[in-house]
Structures are given as C-alpha cells and as structure tokens.
Amino acid sequence: MRRQLVALGGASLLFGVSAFAVQAQSITPGELPDPPVFEAQGTPTFVGISDIFEYKALPEYHEPEWVTTNFVDKGLLPPVGERLPAEPMVFKASNAVDGIGVYGDVMRHVIGGRPEGWNYIGGQSQGWGGIDIGMMECLTRTGPLFEVKAEELAPLPNLAKSWEWSEDGHELTMHLIEGAKWSDGDPFDTEDIMFYWEDNVLDPNVSPTNGATPETFGEGTTLEALDEYTIKWTFKDVRPEQYLYQMAYGTFCPGPSHILKTKHPKYNPDITYDEYKNGWPAEFMNWPVLGAWVPVEYRADDIIVLRRNPYYWKVDENGNQLPYLNEMHYRLSTWADRDVQAVAGTGDFSNLEQAESYVEALKRSADANAPARLAFGARTIGYALEFNYSANGWGEPDERAQAVRELNRNLDFRKAVTSAVNRQALGESLIRGPFTAIYPGGLYAGTTFYDKASTVYYPFNLEGANATLDTLGLVDTDGNGVRNFPADTAGGQDIEITLLANADYGTDGNLAEGIVAMMEPLGLRIILNLQQDVNIGDLSQSGKFDWWVRRQGAEIVSVVQNTVALAPTGPRVHASHRAGTDGTLDLLPFEQEMVDTVNAFVGTNDPAERVELMKKYQKLFTENVYAVGLTQYPGALIINKRFANIPLGAPIFMFNWAEDNIIRERVYVPADKQQNYELHPNTLPGAPGSEGPISG
Ligand code: GLA
C-alpha cells in the first residue's frame, strides 16, 4: 500500500507536475466532528471558598483516644491543642456531604509507580497515585476548585492563609499559617519557604519534581521573607493573580528544610548535587511532612504504609484533628491492577483512566452489591504526540536526531504526520462506544476555554500526507519502504524516529504502537522507546527524545493551572521545547506568538480578554500542529462504598488529580463500616530516619 503511494509521488514528479500543484491538493483542514454525547454522572454542588473552610481557634480540640492514652499521657507528645497552630484550618461541616466524621480505617491505594526516594523538591518522585499529594502541602490549593462557583474561582488558601496585593499590583504579601509544625514537631516557617525557593527552584543544579523553575512564577519574579510567617513576592506584571495557581501542587510545596539542608551542597561543600537528590531513599522511614500521613513502612515492590501525622494542622468544626483515616496504603503493583482491585473491593480507590479496562470495570460495578461506586466525569483525559522542537542542543542529539528535530520544526512535515493519524481508529483501538473523541490538539473540547471555531483540524488523509513528504524531498531512495533523509542530511539514511512512551500504562503503550503502525504507510520508521515512569522523567527533562506520546497536563483542561507550561515561556517550562546548551530557546515565529499569548493571558485578569487570548492560542496551536492530538476521553472515579464525605461530581482530573479533589483528610469510614485493615494500629510515626512507627 505504502509503496504504491510513494511510487505515485515519484510518478507525479516524473510527469513534471509542479510542487505547488502537488501541495495544493495535499493537506487542507476539514470539518471537526463533535464529540459523541457522553453524560457525566453527578454534578458538583457549587460553593464559595469560605463555605469550605476558614482559619480560626476553636474552644477545644480532640484526637483519637489511643493518641491521648499511648502518647500524650505518657509525655511522648504534647497535648493536641499545643500541637496545632493557634488558628488551624477548620473544615466546615456543612460543606462535607456526610458531615463530621469518626476516626479509623485505611484507604488502600494501588499504584503502578515506584518511589525513588523522599526528596521531592530535589527531584525524586514517590511513585504518584496520591502518595506525594497526601504527604505535601502547598502555599495554595487547587484540586477542590472543581466545586467552587465560577464567580469565585481562585486558588484556595492553604499554607498561605491570606494575602494582599500592593497598590501598584507588583507586590504580593502572603501570611503563612502560624505555629504549624512538621510531622516530627519541627516548626514550619519562612525558612522552609526560602529554602525551597532559593536552594531548589533558583538553584540551576536542582530540578524539583513537577518542574518548578523561576519562570514558573514569571520572569524576574523575586521572593523574600519579611519575618517568620510573612513572605513577599515581587512581580514584573501588575497583579498577576495567575501565579497563585502555580503556588499549589506541584510547584510550590516546600520540603522539610531542617532535614534537607543537612545534605544540600550549599551548606555542605563536600556533598554533590546527586548525593543531595538521592540523600533520602525510599527505605528512609518517617520522613517529615506537612501533609496528613507520614511514610512508616516500605517494602520494595510490595507496599508503602503511611500513618497519621500527629501534628497535622487541619481540624473539623468540632475540633477533631484531621485526618480521620489513620492509615494509607499504597500497594506497589500496576496501574491496571488499581482498576481491577478497586472494582473487586481489594483496593479502595482508582482513577479509571486507561480506556481499555472500562468495559470490564463498568460491567462489574453495575451490580447493586458491587463494593465500589464508579462515576464518570467529563472528557479530561487526553493524549498527544509531541515533537521535540529544540534544534540547539537540548539533549545533545546526534546527527540523525538533529535531522529529526529539523523535520519536527517544519510545518509541512507536522501536517503530514497529523494527516497520517487515523484518530477514529486510534480511539476505537482503546475502546468502542461513545467514550473517545477525536482530539485535534490544544485545549480539550468541553472545557471552559475551548472554542471550536478556533480549532483547526486536519483529518485523516494518508494520500495528502505522502504527497507532502514527497514535496519535502523525503523520498525512499533505496526502495526499502522507508523514506530517506536528503543525501546531504544525516548521510541520507532511512528516516528513523524514536518515540518515547510510558511503559507503566497500557494506554500509553497502545497509543504509541498505533502511531508506529500508522507511520509505516507514510514511510517513516518509528522506533518505540517504552520506558518506566522514573526514566521518562529523566529522559524527557533532559531532552532525550524525538517524539513522545504524552498524557496531557492540567493546563490543557483548566488553562489556569500551570498556564506557563502551555508554551515555552521560559527555558525549562515546556515539555517538548527547552533551551539548548547555550541556555536560550530557538523559538519558531508561531511559538513566539504562542508565548506572547500565554504571557498576555497570565498578565491580565479580564475574563473577556482571556477568552479571546485562548481562542488565539487554540488557533496557533492547532493550525501549526504544535502537537498531534490523538484522543480524549472521560475518566471515572472508583471508590469503595464504605467511604463517606466523597464530594459530588469529583472529577478524576481537572485542576489536579482526584486524590487532591476529594479532600482525603476529610474522608472517613462510618463506625459500622470500618474494617480491620490497619497494619500498624495504635502507632504513630517515629523519629525521622528511625525504623518504623512507634506504639508509645
Ligand atoms: C498517576 C495516576 C493518576 C493519579 C496521579 C496522582 O499519574 O495515573 O491517576 O493517581 O498519579 O498523582
């Protein structure tokens, strides 16, 4: 089939048809089909921010009885009132669907990732699936915004309990929660904030997990500590409220400076940055956190167990210290197994997100006696094929890889690639039915800023794609079925392109295999580079890929979360275009326009202007095939029926993942439904680095 098409291309040249004529009949935008109707189940009850929580002192505080008897009464812990800030965060009972909870039980997660170690801000991942979300707290919080009414939509206070802008709008002063402590009792204050900022984000030798860089908060932005509990940001823009979103998970969640400083090269000249990053491996127990649960047990390829943080700084309206759940489990298995176990009731939670398992999961949850409830949300899971755009050295490409990057930077080439992708077939290869929708790239259909009229779609058109590559002079010179680079490029060798994809997810692999197959009749040889998540992080951050099938980030869904990552707005902010060896970006003209558009969006708070800017962004993105959109589909939240306080209509992914959205510190299991799942009942975390939990 492909050979025929190449022959056709060759023939047309033979007969002297001008390149223009060939191109004119090749690739043109087409009608974008509307996504099939798919009703999301459950809509959120929309509220104002102050309906959810406030900060205030309560007349009395409570904790699980065993904490009092085994720890406080024995003098091992100060009384709960002394462990809490003067004004803790108080969740309002009226906002919790099942109200005030009771203590006990476990949420049993299953994850496909593996922990590298605990130094998140130094660049280590913990295996995802909500471990890090449960351990870390950030200046602001965005997950629960799915239920905040549009007029009030703004990041929630969290570690920063309030803030105000200077009159000229360039300065933002934030007041931190006062008297909160890390889980080992060490005070949380601006030292932790400044250590995060100065010695991790600003230090070019450190790459915090989740990618915070100085530009994440705007070029030229500075941060200083005014006193123990006050920080001041200074921005170039006027009132860039947008950056409050970046101060949430995962780009402004400080780590325990009292531990981390002991191995940071700035304070320890004999220690290397590698030693700093890897200084606290997964075996290091009782890592101090500000979040609700502390890691107390780790068994490789088996489980991570976390116990309640006795210093957690959030309470319910009756003064009960949170969390309600005493323990968290993370079974170290596979992501597919997370779905299977949640549906079967041997696990408690899953973001059903790999479309291949939907049919089975749906069938099994339909039974009235099924242990878990399953609720679909909107189409917020999506994938794109991304091109490495850096032609000035990022990732140190060899001659072949450099030649591929030059192709990636060519619009006709990208148009050919996108036109060779049969999205309908690709979506159906994952699952049939109304789930998957054709995704042309850019913002997802159905999200707030999406505008169909600004979306350019190049439908499946293999013939046009082949003709276009012919006109680019990319022909199969040696008749082996693979097009060659022109004679003067990379030795005229076969065009081979490596495709990076995440081996931890079946969907990523299936989509990538689909791309390999669909590029064959286009005469491109795609070499699949399936890698585990831990390696994906390193390979992608260091630019070692030609193409990459990537699940899209929150910026594509909400636009306001992680906005700066929508374009290469800084040397290290974009997934597939970063600065080369000289520290600069080689932006294409349309990329510069995208960058300007995104910066203008960040720089204005005018809703109407923002809508227009995102239309422009969408047009630039899709017209130029910035990435090849593949498919978008809905995910479902699966939670065991014994849990209470799961908010209505919680999406698995919007501003953040469901593990943040459902406010797990407030989730509980009613007394009559509690199970004996605790592996370390009546224990609390021990001292940092000590072996495990302690019983008092
Ligand atoms: C992984 C999973 C998601 C979610 C996140 C949370 O990426 O695939 O479903 O659990 O971790 O960080």
Image: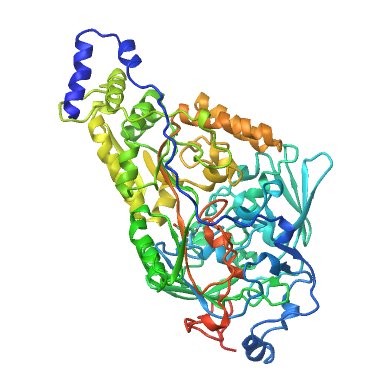
Is 307 placed left or right of 74 in the picture? left
Would you say residue 230 is visible in this rendering? yes
Is 638 placed left or right of 463 in the picture? right
Tell me if residue 293 comes above or below residue 356 in the rendering. below
Q: Farthest left residue?
A: 479
Q: Residue at x 32, y 16 (%)?
A: 25
Q: What colouring style does the render use?
A: rainbow
Front residue of 421 and 38:
38
Tell me if residue 632 comes above or below residue 452 in the rendering. below
Q: Residue at x 48, y 63 (%)?
A: 126
**x%, y% of residue 53?**
72, 63
Would you say residue 270 is visible in this rendering? no
Tell me if residue 164 comes above or below residue 92 in the rendering. above
In the rendered image, which quarter contains the C terminus?
bottom right
Give the image quarter of residue 421. Answer: top left
**x%, y% of residue 330?**
45, 70
Q: Residue at x 37, y 57 (%)?
A: 358
**x%, y% of residue 415?**
38, 27
**x%, y% of residue 662?**
57, 63
Q: Residue at x 48, y 50 (%)?
A: 39
In the rendered image, which quarter contains the N terminus?
top left
